Image: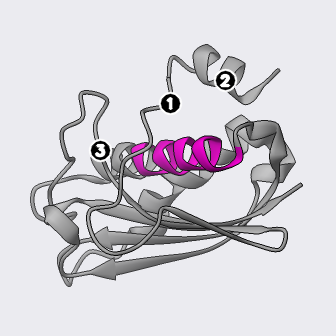
Amino acid sequence: MSVEEKLAALGLSLPEAMAPVAAYVPVVIAGNLAHVSGQISVAADGSLITGRLGADMDVAAGQAAAQRSALMIVAQLRKALGDLAAVKRVVKLNVFVQCTPEFTQQPEVANGASELLVALLGEAGRHARAAVGVPALPRGVAVEVDAVVEVR
């Protein structure tokens, strides 16, 4: 099954790749690595998923936000590569979770992104990862995820 077919089977669709909101590019390809800039949590309707884990969001809501960030990573890769078949392996994710100082479930929130990539890419979706709690993220979003991806 293609990534698009797997998305459909999961009841998901790729959003349009967002344009940068500042002075950067969404994807830089260096050699056989695609470096995907941080992708913020955007709902299917285009609205931002905002909030702070441990204050006004629970882990399940954070996982959903992380999944939406991962979908935007895939959308950015499709736009940059033209074909998701060019993705060889997800190498590393950095997941940033806006949270209270007491919140310690960043790894569980990050699983929303990680599990989606494995569902879409199988073993090629397994990756190294960092999950970090931060006091603020751009535009007040709950989650931001960046990625390093090996490409063909």
What span is colored magenta in the figure? 68-81
Mark 1: secondary structure? loop
Work out which residue is located at the far right of the displayed protein and give it. Answer: 152
Q: Which residue is disc 1 drawn over?
A: 14
Q: Point out residue 104 in the picture as x, y percentages from the top left corner.
A: 35, 76
Query: For the point 41% across and 80% down, which residue is it?
Result: 132
Residue 43 against residue 103 in the figure, above or below: above
Residue 42 numbered tag: 3
Residue 33 against residue 18 in the figure, above or below: below
Q: Point out residue 68 in the picture as x, y percentages from the top left corner.
A: 41, 43
Mark 3: few/some/many CA within 10 Å (<14, 14-19, 20+):
many
Mark 1: few/some/many CA within 10 Å (<14, 14-19, 20+):
some
The amino acid type found where label 2 is placed reads Glu
Query: For the point 19% across and 81% down, which residue is it?
Result: 135
Q: Tell me the chief SS of the magenta region.
A: helix
The span from disc 1 to disc 3 (Cα, nearest Å) is: 11 Å
